[in-house]
Image (cartoon, helix red, strand yellow):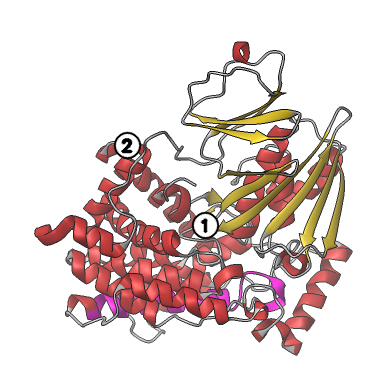
């Protein structure tokens, strides 16, 4: 697998849907599956392991919506995504979804069997968190692809001589023939392929992989050793990292993040204006918060009130299938940008300052996901909300002009106080207690940023905190890892809300746009 990219794995993708690990990752899996079938699909069988997270969440948390959109060739921010199920049927694609007992080790495993009039193929893939995914096998042949390369698959008889320019050529022995997996910056030219059987799977990530790519560090301790006594601001270290990872210039890295800042600010504005969606637990509330804040009727929270407003607005946009940025996930999409943009505006900072703060956050996210995960299905909400708080704390220190070590200290303290956080979505929707947890993550980040600026001692190095969170997740029961089988998700009120939503969906009611 390729090294983590800030724009692939941490701040992104730009998407619609309630959950990045469900919707965006499923869409990317669907896109690769579509390419495997040369864009022609007549039947799809989708199988989920009974012991995983998807049997109980695939419909309500966006896996179906994303997968269907991917099979249709759509992008993750396509406005048609909420109706992708109907679009799949209109395209004449027969769909079956089954729960099976196969013992898949990863909770977010997709088993697809795809057919058209000429051929049948199988694909097994996993969602690894934050919209990232990995294909594990095609037609029963174990392989690895994360969507960062142009992948050319070539079936040919044993003994055939081949000579391709590629970043990697992997030979899979199939007995009487071989399957060649060619990873490159472009597909193998057609004149190299005849008369072999060939499939071409296009990249689905914004930052492609490439041969001989090297990053300067992958962990926080590595970064500190690399930088030594230079005390380089963490946003500059983030730029150096992403320049090496993506082959970008410094200007390109900053411009990419400014573009994301602008998407986020538009989403915040649309959230405050008001949102609606049928299959939704909470109605529009951020507008009322703004009204009372402006009237001076809330407790004096200073910039924190603006942060809470922006966090709630972004969560409402997510829940209405508007455009968001997974930062690092859709379920935790609001804490980091709400904190950064809210505080930056209160400090009269510009969009470049916001971008630098998000880059600092992105580097903390690199350290987290390289060592562990952003997926709540693997790590509970400590993997989502905890990561968001840690990233946001470093970003806020950066806005304040703090040092490298203060940013790292803030990230460590913020993550420490989120360990053990479970994922228990009410009514099987990624809205509540996700809203409160995003607000808590942003508030925690602000407190820890100020503590770090005052040189409070985090005691435990960030890498060790990440490892501790991973150890906690391994002791966490499945019921508390985004399965809707524990915590608030199984309270009587939660189950009643879920029943009512299912009833409204069946009746086609949605005119009120709230409950």
Q: Main secondary structure of the magenta part?
A: helix
Q: In x, y percent, where is residue 7?
A: 42, 48
Q: Quadrant of residue 284?
A: bottom right
Horizontal arrangement in the rendering, residue 257 relative to residue 407 (left or right): right
Horizontal arrangement in the rendering, residue 327 relative to residue 232 (left or right): right
Circle 1 or circle 2, nearest the eye: 2
Q: Find disc 1 in the rendering and name its residue.
A: 270
Q: Relative to 334, is 427 above or below? A: below
User: Which of 484/461 is in front?
Assistant: 461
Label 1, label 2: how far apart the Cα atoms are: 32 Å
Identify the residue at image location x=79%, y=30%.
40
User: Which of 508/171 is in front?
Assistant: 171
Identify the residue at image location x=64%, y=55%.
126
Q: Find disc 2 in the rendering and name its residue.
A: 248
Identify the residue at image location x=51%, y=71%.
286
| In magenta stretch: residue 11 | no
Magenta-tinted stretch? 426-451
User: Which of 78/212 is in front?
Assistant: 212
Q: In x, y percent, where is residue 253?
A: 32, 42
| In magenta stretch: residue 441 | yes
Q: Earlier in the sequence, mark 1 or mark 2?
A: 2
Badge 2 element: loop
* Number of other residues with Cα within 10 Å of mark 2, as a class: few under 14, some 14 to 19, many 20 or more: some
The numbered disc on residue 123 is none
User: Which of 422/218 is in front?
Assistant: 218
Q: Quadrant of residue 137?
A: top right
Q: In x, y percent, where is residue 460?
A: 29, 79
Q: Quadrant of residue 336?
A: bottom left
| Most distant residue in the top direction | 191
Q: Quadrant of the C terminus?
A: bottom right
* Number of other residues with Cα within 10 Å of mark 1, as a class: few under 14, some 14 to 19, many 20 or more: some
Residue 238, visible in the rendered structure: yes
């Amino acid at each position: 697998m390729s090294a983590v990219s800030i724009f692939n794995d941490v701040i992104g993708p730009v998407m619609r849907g309630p959950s990045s690990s469900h919707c965006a990752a499923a869409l990317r899996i669907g896109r690769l599956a579509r390419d495997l079938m040369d864009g022609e699909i007549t039947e799809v069988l989708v199988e989920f392991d009974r012991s995983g997270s998807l049997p109980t969440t695939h419909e309500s948390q966006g896996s179906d919506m994303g997968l269907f959109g991917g099979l249709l060739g759509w992008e993750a921010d396509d406005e048609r995504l909420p109706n992708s199920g109907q679009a799949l049927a209109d395209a004449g694609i027969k769909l079956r979804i089954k729960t099976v007992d196969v013992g898949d080790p990863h909770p977010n495993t997709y088993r697809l069997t795809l057919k058209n009039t000429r051929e049948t193929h199988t694909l097994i893939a996993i969602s690894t968190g934050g919209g990232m995914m990995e294909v594990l096998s095609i037609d029963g042949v174990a392989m690895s692809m994360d969507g960062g390369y142009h992948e050319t698959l070539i079936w040919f008889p044993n003994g055939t001589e081949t000579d391709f320019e590629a970043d990697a050529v992997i030979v899979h022995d199939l007995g009487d023939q071989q399957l060649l997996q060619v990873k490159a910056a472009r597909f193998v030219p057609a004149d190299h392929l005849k008369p072999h059987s060939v499939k071409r799977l296009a990249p689905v990530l914004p930052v492609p992989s490439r041969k001989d790519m090297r990053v300067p560090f992958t962990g926080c301790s590595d970064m500190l050793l690399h930088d030594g006594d230079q005390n380089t601001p963490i946003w500059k270290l983030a730029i150096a990292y992403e320049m090496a990872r993506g082959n970008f210039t410094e200007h390109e890295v900053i411009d990419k993040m400014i573009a994301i800042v602008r998407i986020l600010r538009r989403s915040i504005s649309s959230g405050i204006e008001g949102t609606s969606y049928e299959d939704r637990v909470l109605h529009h509330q951020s507008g009322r918060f703004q009204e009372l804040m402006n009237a001076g009727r809330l407790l004096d929270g200073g910039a924190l009130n603006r942060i809470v407003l922006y966090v709630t607005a972004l969560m409402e946009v997510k829940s209405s299938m508007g455009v968001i940025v997974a930062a690092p996930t859709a379920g935790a999409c609001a804490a980091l940008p709400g904190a950064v943009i809210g505080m930056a505006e209160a400090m009269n900072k510009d969009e470049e300052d916001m971008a630098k703060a998000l880059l600092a956050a992105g580097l903390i996210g690199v350290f987290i996901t390289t060592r562990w995960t952003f997926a709540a299905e693997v790590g509970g909400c400590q993997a989502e909300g905890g990561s968001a708080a840690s990233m946001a704390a470093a970003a806020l220190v950066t806005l304040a002009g703090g040092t490298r070590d203060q940013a790292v200290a803030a990230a460590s303290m913020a993550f420490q106080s989120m360990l053990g956080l479970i994922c228990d979505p009410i009514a099987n929707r990624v809205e509540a207690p996700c809203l409160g947890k995003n607000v808590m993550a942003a508030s925690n980040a602000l407190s820890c940023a100020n503590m770090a600026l005052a040189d409070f001692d985090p005691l435990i190095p960030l890498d060790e905190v990440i490892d501790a969170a991973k150890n906690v997740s391994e002791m966490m029961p499945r019921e508390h890892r985004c399965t809707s089988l524990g915590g608030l998700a199984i309270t009587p009120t939660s189950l009643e809300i879920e029943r009512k939503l299912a009833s409204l969906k069946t009746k086609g009611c949605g005119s009120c746009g709230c409950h």
